[in-house]
Image (cartoon, rainbow, N blue to C red):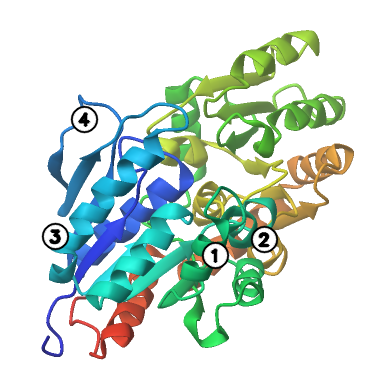
Amino acid sequence: MKNNSPLSVLMLSPQYRPLVGGYERAAERLSAALVTRGHRVTVIAERRDPTWPALETLDGVTLRRLWCAFKPRVHQMTSLPRFAFFLLMRGRSFDVWHVHQYGLHAAQAVALGKLLGRPVVLKLTSSGDQGLARTAAKGGFAAISSALMRRVSAVVALTRETKLEAQAFGISAERVHQLGNGVDTGLFRRYGDNERTQLKNTLGIGAGGVVVAVGRLSKEKNPDGLLHAWSIAKQELSADWNLVVVGDGPMRAELEATVRALGLGDSVRIVGQQSNIDQWIGAADIYVSSSHREGLSNTLLEAMAGALPVVATCVSGVNELVKESGAGLVVDVGDMPRLAEALVRLAGNAKLRDAMGAAGRMFIEERYSIGSVAASHEALYASLIGVRPGSGS
């Protein structure tokens, strides 16, 4: 391959659009940004629904969905052979393979990458209980899977914690690269007061103060804890402050019942899954995250890009994102009374909100804009195949 020629990148992302979780959105953004920089990107994903097209182009990215029987305990075993067949038949036509989900798909890709002479990059999205070591230790092929993933060409770690865990797992330091998820800083931006008021009216969330939480309604995100924190905070907040919860998941019915039981119906709205996250963040005054476990949260990055001050529990990456940048207030995991105190403090101090929001926006512009994150990945890919990065802008 000649210097400055486009790279041909294969993304292995078993979950992809129309699925809209954190790692899916991050893979989608990176893929589109690399295309914008002049590279050719193909994504292979599981075709979990037969109505989904097997082949389509999205934002310049070629998406191939490979058949699987999407049933409990069997879908991975049916998708693995399809992924393997694609890699064996077409894998050599790509310069580098980037795997966005660790586990058996990653182990298989590393093995076939060694066979076919293709470098494999593995993205680590979480730490602790959901980290690389714990995940690799699960299942009947744990020893083989772990040994293979230790031979990966390079690792992309989202936070310092995941970087250190990768090295402790047995991946040498020179193969571990801390690169974050990218944010579209044009889409997620600071809204002026008039724009925010108009958005609040459009979304029907009232003209008062708005605290927004975005994420899956599941145990690890601790949305029930957030409601209890809000019930404490609301006793000290003016009547025009509201909490808006954006997202869906297995706890939604339980949470709606909790809202009723705590008498919060006048100040809490659970609006379900939304496609216009930029507008919900743009309309808000404070962003809150109450998670028990988290990787590098996309919505946290988006909120900071939108110049929202943050209140968050101290899960992976939060200290280096929020506390060190001055973008918000951080409390211990599970400490909902302190979370409530932090919300009250920010709600009552507009100058502090503005200062923290501005600090967060600056931090994202410097380190997490999708353009700079894509450029860093481009440089990593090029280093693995021994060429200079392409000339895309």
Please say whether residue 183 is visible from this viewpoint: no
What type is the residue that disc 3 sits on? Met
Q: Is residue 374 left or right of residue 345?
A: left
Q: Earlier in the sequence, mark 3 or mark 2?
A: 3
Question: The residue tagged with tag 1: helix, strand or loop?
Answer: helix
What type is the residue that disc 1 sits on? Ser
Q: Earlier in the sequence, mark 4 or mark 1?
A: 4
Q: Which residue is mark 2?
A: 322
Task: Determine the image quadrant of residue 325.
Answer: bottom right
Q: Which residue is mark 1?
A: 146
Q: Earlier in the sequence, mark 2 or mark 1?
A: 1
Of the 4 image quadrants, the one containing the C terminus is bottom left
Task: Determine the image quadrant of residue 240.
Answer: top right
Q: Is residue 35 left or right of residue 168?
A: left
Residue at 76% over, 47% down: 349
Q: Name the front one of labels 3 and 4.
A: 3
Q: Is residue 253 above or below residue 39?
A: above
Question: The residue tagged with tag 2: helix, strand or loop?
Answer: helix
Please say whether residue 91 is visible from this viewpoint: yes
Residue at 45% over, 63% down: 123
